[in-house]
Image (cartoon, grey):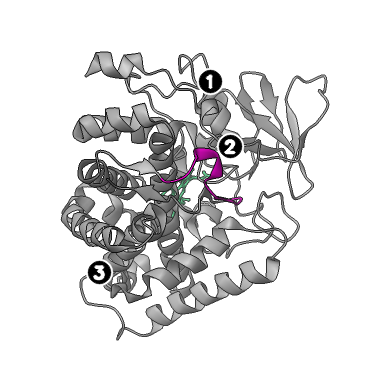
Amino acid sequence: MTLAAESLRISIADIPNLDTPEPFVRRLPAEPDGFERIELPSGHTAVCLTSYADVRTVLFDSTASRELCNVDGGPSFMPTTWAPEVLINLDNPVHGLVRRFVAHEFSAHSLAGLAPTVEKLTIAACEQLERAAEPDLVRWVFRVVPAQTTLTLLGLPTDRAAWMNEQGRIVQYADRDDIPGIEAAWLQLWDWVGSLISDSSEHDDTGLLAVYKRRAAQPEYADIDDSLLQGTVMGIVLGGDNNIATMLTKTAYAALAHPPLYRLVASDPQSYVPKLVEEILRLMPLGTPGTFPRLLLNPLETSKGTLPVGTIVYPWVNAANRDPSVFHEPLMIDLNRPPRKHLQYGYGMHRCMGSALAQMELITVLTLVFTRYPDAALAIEPSRVPWDFGVGLRRPSALPVVLH
Ligand code: HEM
C-alpha cells in the first residue's frame, strides 16, 4: 500500500483548473516595514500574512474583529455584507456565548450516530445516478447528500434539499455582477429560516431546531434571541450543505482527472479516502479566499514585526498550507504525508464549527463512491469539465462519468 502511494507523483498544478487563483485584486509595492500588502476586492489595503506560524497567530487572536469588517463599505472579499448574527461575523463576548450554545451538537462524538443516515442517503443517491441517462456525480450525489443530511440534522423533511442547495450556491458563489441575485437568494433562505424559528409545525421534536429552541428558553441563554438563533441556523444551512458539496466535488475531480490516483484510492478506499480528503483539503479552500479579513483591535506580534491597532489583516490560509517549512514539496498530492494540521478549517475562536460533520460526510460519501465504482472514469476530458468559479464556492459544476 505504501509503495503504491509513493510511486504516484502528482502536483495539483497538473490537474486542469483545480488550483486556486490568488483571491485579491493585486499585490501592492513593498514598503520599508517588510510586510506584504494586497488590495482586497472591496478596495481596502490589507496586510497579507502567508507563513504557517503567522497565519495561525492572527487566527488565534480572539480580539481581532470580524464584526467591524462585515459592515457596508468594510474590508471584504464578498460583494455584499452578511447578516451580523452569523457566527463568523460575531466578536466576543457574543461570539463565545453563541458558540457555547450551538457547538455541543457538532462534536465528532455527537455526530457519530448520523453516519448510517449519510450512508443510506448516499446509496439512494447512487441508485438515482445509475438510472440517469447522463450520470453526473455532482447533480445526483454531491449536491444532494449534504443538503439532505443538513435538513435531517435540523429535523426537517428532505424535500427542500434541491431548493436550499441552489439558494446557498448563489449566495456562496457571490457573483459580483449579480448583486440582486445574491440578495434575493439570501433573503429567501433567511426568511425561510426565520419561519422555522417562529413556527414549530414544520420540524420534528428531536432535530437541532427543536433542541436549540428548547435551549434558548433556558435562563443562562436569555441573551440568545430569535435573530441570533436565526443567524446560527443560517450558518448551519449555508456551511452544512454547499461547503461539503464543494469539497466532495473537488476531491472526486482530483482523482477522476488523474486515473492512476483514482485506481489507487479505489483499490483500498478505507485507507486511502481519508488521506486523499486530507490532502485536497490542505490544498484547496472552498472558494478563493478561504478565510475572511480581520481588523486588529490590539497590536499583533508576527515573525516580521508588530502590526499596529487598526491594521486590516488577511490570514492567507492557502499560502500557509503550502509553507515549505511545514509541508515538504507542498504542491504534491502525497497520500503518505505525515499527519500535520492544515489550516483549511481555520484556527482559534472562529475555527469551523462544522469540521467534524464535514469530515464524517466527506469520508462516508467518498468511501461509498470509490467502493461502488472502482472503475469510474470521467466521460469528458478533464480540461472540458465545467466549473463554478465563485468567491466562496469554486468547484466543478458537473462531473459526467462512465461508471462501468
Ligand atoms: C469541508 C468543508 C468546510 C470547510 C473547508 C470550512 C472552512 C471554514 C473556515 C476556514 C472557517 C473559518 C473562517 C475564518 O476564520 O475566517 C469556517 C468557519 C465556520 N464554518 Fe466551516 N467549513 C466547512 C464546513 C462547514 C460545515 C459543514 C458547517 C456547518 C454545519 C460549517 C459552519 C461554519 C461556521 C458556523 C463557521 C463560523 C464559526 C465561528 O465563527 O465560530 N462549515 N469554516
Which residue is nearer to you in this view: 44 or 296? 44
Q: Is residue 308 left or right of residue 136?
A: right
Secondary structure beneath dot 2 equals: loop
Quadrant position of residue 17? top right
Q: Which residue is mark 2?
A: 20
Which residue is nearer to you in this view: 20 or 380? 380
Residue 192 in percent (x, y) is at 45, 78
Q: Which one is in front in this view, the residue at disc 3 or the one at disc 2? A: 2
Q: Which one is in front in this view, the residue at disc 1 or the one at disc 3? A: 1
Amino acid type indicated by mark 1: Asp
Q: Quadrant of the N terminus?
A: top left
Residue 380 drawn in magenta? yes
Q: Which residue is mark 3?
A: 207
Which segment is the magenta one? 379-391
Q: Which residue is mark 1?
A: 323
CA gap, disc 2 to disc 1? Answer: 16 Å
Please name the residue shown 25% across and 34% down the image.
Answer: 266
CA gap, disc 3 to disc 2? Answer: 36 Å
Residue 24 drawn in magenta? no
